[in-house]
Image (cartoon, helix red, strand yellow):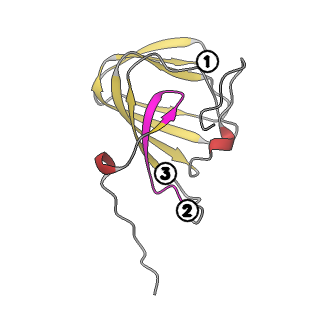
Amino acid sequence: MDKRFERVQLDELSPVPCPCGQARRAFASAENQTATLHLVDIQEDAKTHYHKRLTEIYLVLEGEGEIELDGERFPVKPMSAIMIKPGCRHRAIGKMKIINLPVPAFDPEDEWFDTPTEPMNP
């Protein structure tokens, strides 16, 4: 019988580059299309990007800064939560650590930029 659960230690996963900095992505497998959970370390202003299919929920754990949503900036601090719907151009500004919950599961093919940029996963 297949297990009906998965467990992970986020801080032990290897980080990968993302438009926001470095992400540790849990539950990212071909079999899982439901949702993923990312621990993201933002050390510099993120690149503005959007998703055509994903909704993302950000939860700020540490640090302070701003979140830019469709050109508007809003202050964020620990325990600030933001739901980012498909098509919303967004980026984090400042140094912070966040949890990102993409629904459905994160797909690197659904990461879009309005200006040319280097691919995140060469």
Q: Give the crowd class for mark 2: few <14, some 14-19, many >=20 residues within 10 Å.
A: few
Disc 2 vs disc 1: Cβ atoms closer than 8 Å? no
Q: Secondary structure at mark 1?
A: loop
Please give the label number shown on residue 62: none
Q: Which residue is mark 3?
A: 36
Numbered disc 3: secondary structure:
loop
69 up-or-down from 106: above or below = above
In the image shown, does 122 or 104 lie closer to the viewer?
122
Identify the magenta region. 17-29
Q: Nearer the viewer, mark 1 or mark 3?
A: 3
Q: Amino acid at mark 2?
A: Asn
Q: Is residue 95 left or right of residue 26?
A: left
Compute the Cα span from label 1 to label 3.
Answer: 24 Å
| Image mark for residue 70 | 1
Task: Kindly indicate the quadrant of the structure image that contains residue 116.
Answer: top right
Task: State yes or no: residue 22 in magenta.
Answer: yes
Q: Is residue 66 left or right of residue 77?
A: right
Local secondary structure at mark 2 = loop
Q: Position of residue 43 (x, y in %)?
A: 38, 21
Q: Which residue is mark 2?
A: 32
At a point 39% along the width and 46% down the height, the residue shown is: 14
Q: Nearer the viewer, residue 42 or 89?
A: 42
What's the magenta bit mostly, secondary-structure-wise? strand
Which amino acid type is marked by label 1?
Answer: Asp
- Residue shown at the point (60%, 33%) measured from the top left: 120
Question: Mark 3 packing: few (<14 Cα in 10 Å), some, or many (20+)?
Answer: many
- Density class for disc 1 (Cα within 10 Å; few <14, some 14-19, many ≥20) is some
Where does the image place residue 105, in percent across and percent down from the top left?
Answer: 56, 52
Q: CA distance from mark 2 to mark 3?
A: 8 Å
Q: Identity of the amino acid at label 3?
A: Thr
* Contact check, label 2 and label 3, Cβ < 8 Å: yes
Task: Give the alpha-carbon distance from disc 2 to disc 1, as whole Å.
Answer: 29 Å
